[in-house]
Amino acid sequence: MSFWGDEPQRRRENRAIIKRKVWARDKGICQLCLQKVDSQDWTLAHNKARVKGGNLTVANTFVAHYSCNSSQGTSSLRQTRRATGFIAAEDKTRKALRGMSVVQLRTLAVRKGVKVRGTVVEDLISTYRTAPSKVKYVNALSKKATLRDIAAVKALKVEKPKKRRRRQKGLLDW
């Protein structure tokens, strides 16, 4: 809310409309146990619990059995799946990406068109950039790459790029 109270009021979407949209998106499958749900006997489960600040939106809800939803508690969908031993495709992709070298990850990022940026470090005297870390590559590629893409890049003989030597500047060099 703004200081003057001139912010427009947002209309909340009707619960029935949200329920229909979520049912259509999830195709009647419980996202926790991945079993078919009866069209009359299901509930909206929250990815981020309402007690933790989650809202009733299409993006934050999913289809679940009543028993699955009650066993979820305030955990997120990912936390609940991991606790029950369900391994998602994204988890397998992340594991495969962690097993690759940074050079292979860079090659895969170029192939998939993913831009990964390094960090800017500011010292007392100078400012310079560092290369992206392996974790940044894994996080960016886990959403785009498939296991087939990873296998194709691992099969390639990727050469390491030659290191460029930087001339160190001293205090008296301007």
Image (spheres, rainbow, N blue to C red):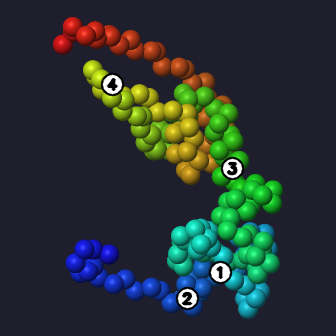
- Mark 3 crowd level (few <14, some 14–19, many ≥20, 10 Å Cα): few
Q: Quadrant of the N terminus?
A: bottom left
**Inter-mark Cα distance, 3 to 2:** 32 Å
Measured from the top left, where is residue 125 in percent x and y?
27, 20
Residue for point 56% across, 52% down: 143
The three-letter amino acid code for the residue at tag 2 is Arg
Residue identified by numbered label 3:
91
SS assignment at label 4: loop
The three-letter amino acid code for the residue at tag 3 is Asp
Residue identified by numbered label 4:
123
Identify the residue at the far front of this view: 3
Residue identified by numbered label 1:
44
**On the image, which quarter does residue 12 sit in?**
bottom left
Residue 12 visible? The answer is yes
Mark 1 touching mark 2, by CB under 8 A? yes
Which of pointers 3 and 2 lies earlier in the amino acid sequence? Answer: 2
**Inter-mark Cα distance, 4 to 3:** 37 Å
Measured from the top left, where is residue 57 in percent x and y?
52, 77
Find residue 15 and name its label.
2
